[in-house]
Amino acid sequence: MQKELIYTLYERFWHWLQAVVILTLLFTGFSVHYSGSAGVISFATAVRLHNVVGWLLVINAFLGFFYYVTTGTVRQLIPEPRELHVLAWRQLRYYLYGMFHGEPHPLQRSRQRRLNPLQQLTYLAILNILLPIQVVTGVTLWFMQYSPELMHRVGGIGNLAAVHMLGAWFFAAFVLAHIYLATTGPTLWQHFVTMITGYEIVEEPSAGDATSAQQNEIA
């Protein structure tokens, strides 16, 4: 066994900042939507905080996009078309059955391969569908307070707010699933520790495995 750096300092900082931002947006967003019953913070405070943190999300997402593209790390999000359905099925079976019966994880994580196929497909859907919808609807709702004409052009605030709220529920479901799956490592806290320190204990490949991996890369 050996320690391997899985996440750089910036990647860890970006992850935790994004986590705080998303949780804050969910809290303030639901506070705005259920302001008459929740009563945790005032409606005006929730709106102001939601707007500020929303712009922070946009800025942090852009910086993350710039980092992942310029460093080539964005390739981690792109599934390997070859045998994708086989690898995805193995991962799904592990989540539904294998991890409850002590089976080893089908994917050995490394710096070059951190995400399994299901994670890749999920993150691609979030980054290319869910996040853009939330940003566009959120920014439009923000501009409505300064441009009443815009409200009429988009058919009123009700429909737009409903789409934005639906996206928030999807984000909330993702956060809950993400936290749960993070607890399914070798120990309850290992994945959390990895995201804090950047290092993970992985199995050192044998000489035969290394030779096989080189041959696959050449092929």
Image (cartoon, rainbow, N blue to C red):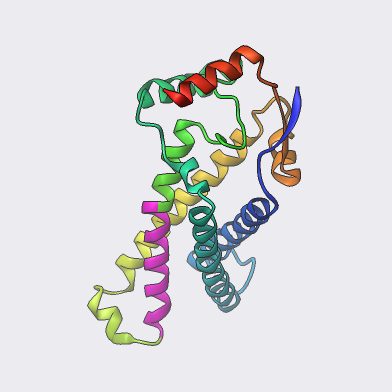
Q: Is residue 195 left or right of residue 213?
A: right
- Residue 98 in picture, x, y percent from top left: 55, 16
* Residue at x-position 68% and y-position 36%: 191
- Residue 20 in picture, x, y percent from top left: 64, 58
Q: Is residue 2 above or below residue 53?
A: above
Judge by depth and name the residue closer to the eye, 85 or 131: 85
* Residue at x-position 38% and y-position 52%: 128
Please provide the residue range marked out in magenta.
128-145
Number of marks in the rendered image: 0
* Snapshot quadrant of residue 188: top right
Judge by depth and name the residue closer to the eye, 214 or 112: 214
In the picture, the quarter occupied by the C terminus is: top left
* Snapshot quadrant of residue 178: top right
Q: Is residue 6 above or below residue 128?
A: above
- Residue 58 in picture, x, y percent from top left: 50, 67
Residue 102 visible: no
* Residue at x-position 35% and y-position 26%: 82
Magenta-span inclusion, residue 142: yes
Judge by depth and name the residue closer to the eye, 208 or 105: 208
Residue 58 visible: yes
Q: Is residue 144 left or right of residue 38?
A: left
In the picture, the quarter occupied by the N terminus is: top right
Q: Is residue 165 left or right of residue 18?
A: left
Secondary structure mostly taken by the magenta-highlighted segment of the chain: helix
Q: What residue occupies the far front of the structure in this picture?
A: 218
